Each structure stands twice: as structure tokens, then as C-alpha cells.
Amino acid sequence: MTGGVARFLTLNLWGENGPWEARIALINKRLDALAPDVIGLQEVREVPGRVPNQAALLAGARGWHHAFAPTSGWGGGHEGLAIVSRFPIGAQEFRPLPHSTEAEGRGILSARLDGEAGGLWVHTTHLSYREQEGLWREAQVQFVDEVLTRHDNGNPRIVMGDFNTTPESDELRWLCGQHTLGGRRVAYQDAWAAVRQDHPGYTWTRANDYTEKMHWLRRDRRLDYIFVTPVRRDHRATVRAAALAFEEPEVRPDGERIFASDHFGVTADLQLLAES
């Protein structure tokens, strides 16, 4: 964290799909240049004897800390959510989301970051993915807000993840204070929209070869987000920058293009400490 600003990264890891070992190696190679302080991950795999916990691999490569929570059984192991942090993790909590099923687990993982982070709670989540499941996502975002509110200790509230819908949807408009759900309104900042009106920020896009595996899903959409509560008078929660991550493939000598995932990641630089 520099000058009270920390960099957050969200990425759907895509489990063990595709050349997963090469993908994890690519992520590890590029993380140092990205220099995040906190990473929120979705679709993290852990399969005993076949796939080491992928979040532990990323954390261990740099001597960082991680929290993991399984959401679904998968191939003799689990798929789940994870938070990787250069700050110590003092506590963690997992809650299943409404409409989570055994086959398609959906949840929210929360972690308290101690040390220099000052007891900051951060959260990562993964919402239902089908376009017709908007009503499910409406219930899910309201539950996400309840979890963040329960962990409110005066710091900015931050949630990252694969929300599986576009900024124009009712569920995300509700998060940003532009729509009413359940007789309630809230107001979070969409970090990308706060500072990047110059770029659509698509994270699920035909520019990524791996999206062809799920070609029936509409592509060229922004599905991955970092949300933070409104800017404080002391400048906390100000979004200083946002960028796509892992959007460029690594091209092998044989011409194969290796992407980090079927999603692009998103980074956001957030002001955590007060400025006079």
C-alpha cells in the first residue's frame, strides 16, 4: 500500500479448464508487474492428488496469505472462492447466497485484513450466471449488501467478483443506487465506471479464445467488478485508477495463445487511509 492507496484485483480463475498449469504460471509471472495488494478469486479448484489449491499456489509463490471456501464439489475435490492478500488475514467467513445449489454453489467469502490494512473487511463473490436468472441475482446482491453491512467497522466496504451480468441490469443498478429492490436502495461505486468512461471494460469477450468453450453465452460484456462504498469526506474510498488485467495472451512458439482465464481480470486502486 502506497500513500494510503491499495490495489485490488478480481479474477475468475476458470478452475482446471484449458491448460490450467500454464495459465497459473502465466498469472504468477504477471502478478509482480500488476502489483496488487489484495486479490479476490472465483472458480478456484482444489482436487487432492490432482490440483493443488490454486489460491494457495498464488499466495505461496510470494509468501502471502490466503483464505479459501468451497462452494461446490467438483471432480473429487472442490471449487470455491478465495482471497489472497499481502496483508495478514485475521478472520474469515463464508455464507452461501440465495439460490445456491449443490451443483452450482454460489456464495460470498469475507476476510478481515489486519496489519497495515487496519482491520479492513474485503469480500469476493460469484453470482448465478444464466442471463434469465436476473431475479436470482437480485436476491443475491441484496444478500451481499447485508453481509457487507454486518462487517461494517468504519472502513470502506469492498466487494469483488464475477457478478455475471452487465452494468445496465436491475441488480447492478440497485447496487449503484439507481434502482429499488425490496423497498430499499443502497449506493456503491462501480470502480470501473468511476474512472474509466473511456473504455467499455469487457471482461467476457470474443477477444479471449477461451470464451468459445461457452459460445452460447452472449459475449463482449462486462461481468467482473470491484464495488466500494461512496467516497468519504476524508477521501477514503476514492477510486484512483482502474484497469483490465490479463487481457493479453502469451503466445507460444507453436502459435498457441495462452490466456490467464476465460475472463479478463479487473484492478482498482482505492484510497483506504484518510487524506487531510
Image (spheres, rainbow, N blue to C red):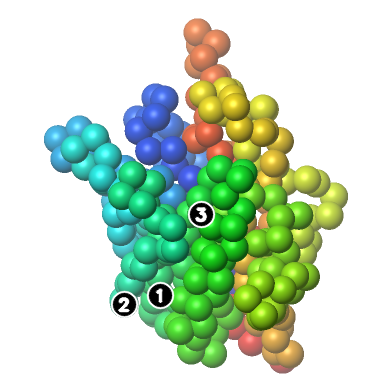
| N-term-proximal mark, 3 vs 2 | 2
Q: Amino acid at mark 3?
A: Leu
Q: Residue at x 85, y 50 (%)?
A: 198
Residue labelled with disc 2: 90
State yes or no: discs 2 and 1 in contact (Cβ < 8 Å). yes
Say left or right for 252 vs 86.
right
Residue 146 visible, this angle: yes
Name the foreground residue: 131 vs 56.
Answer: 131
Q: Residue at x 33, y 44 (%)?
A: 103
State yes or no: discs 3 and 1 in contact (Cβ < 8 Å). no
* Percent coordinates x, y for residue 115 in the rendering: 39, 79
Q: Quadrant of residue 205?
A: top right
Mark 3 and mark 2: Cα distance apart in space: 26 Å
Within 10 angstroms of label 2, few (less than 14), some, or many (20 or more) residues?
A: some
Residue labelled with disc 1: 113
Single out the mark in the foreground, 3 or 1.
Answer: 3
Q: Amino acid at mark 1?
A: Leu
